[in-house]
């Protein structure tokens, strides 16, 4: 029984990742931010890097959270955009 539950959980996790949108657009006053979600999935390999322990939409995701998570990661890894106009497009 435990093996069946573990297998079902694994299938649900994999299905969630495979059904995620290829690109995501976040609306913002100074220009929307569109990023390649699929590329981030392939690069980071683990959903929890951004999503924590939950799959799907990131809870309480707002301007401050996006800047801390996304911009912070780009600065730390020295990869990807870090300036306003590189992400925000009008």
Image: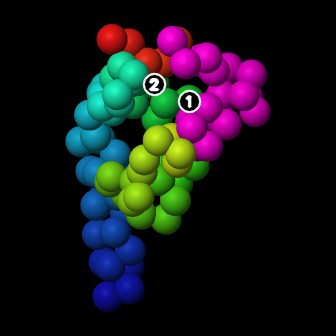
Residue at figure coordinates x 58%, y 43% from the top left: 69
Q: Position of residue 50 (x, y in %)?
A: 52, 48
Q: Nearer the viewer, residue 16 or 78?
A: 78
Left or right of 41? Residue 11 is left
The residue pinned by badge 1 equals 43
Mark 2 packing: few (<14 Cα in 10 Å), some, or many (20+)? Answer: few
Q: Nearer the viewer, residue 61 or 58?
A: 61
Q: Quadrant of the N terminus?
A: bottom left
The residue pinned by badge 2 equals 39
Residue at figure coordinates x 52%, y 54% from the top left: 48
Secondary structure at badge 2 equals: helix
Q: Position of residue 38 (x, y in %)?
A: 39, 28
In the displayed image of the protein, which residue is found farthest to the bottom?
Answer: 1
- Residues drawn in magenta: 67-85
Image height of 53 relative to 66, above or below = below
Label 1–label 2 contact, CB within 8 A? yes
Residue at figure coordinates x 39%, y 59% from the top left: 59
Q: Position of residue 75 (x, y in %)?
A: 72, 28
Residue at figure coordinates x 74%, y 22% from the top left: 78
């Amino acid at each position: 029984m435990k093996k069946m539950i573990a297998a079902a959980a694994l299938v649900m996790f994999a299905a969630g990742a495979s059904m995620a949108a290829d690109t995501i657009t976040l609306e913002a006053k100074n220009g929307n931010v569109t990023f390649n979600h699929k590329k981030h999935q392939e690069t980071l390999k683990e959903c929890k890097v951004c999503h924590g322990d939950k799959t799907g939409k990131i809870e309480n995701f707002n301007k401050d959270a996006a800047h801390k998570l996304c911009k912070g990661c780009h600065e730390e890894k020295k990869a990807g955009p870090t300036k306003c106009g590189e992400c925000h497009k009008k």
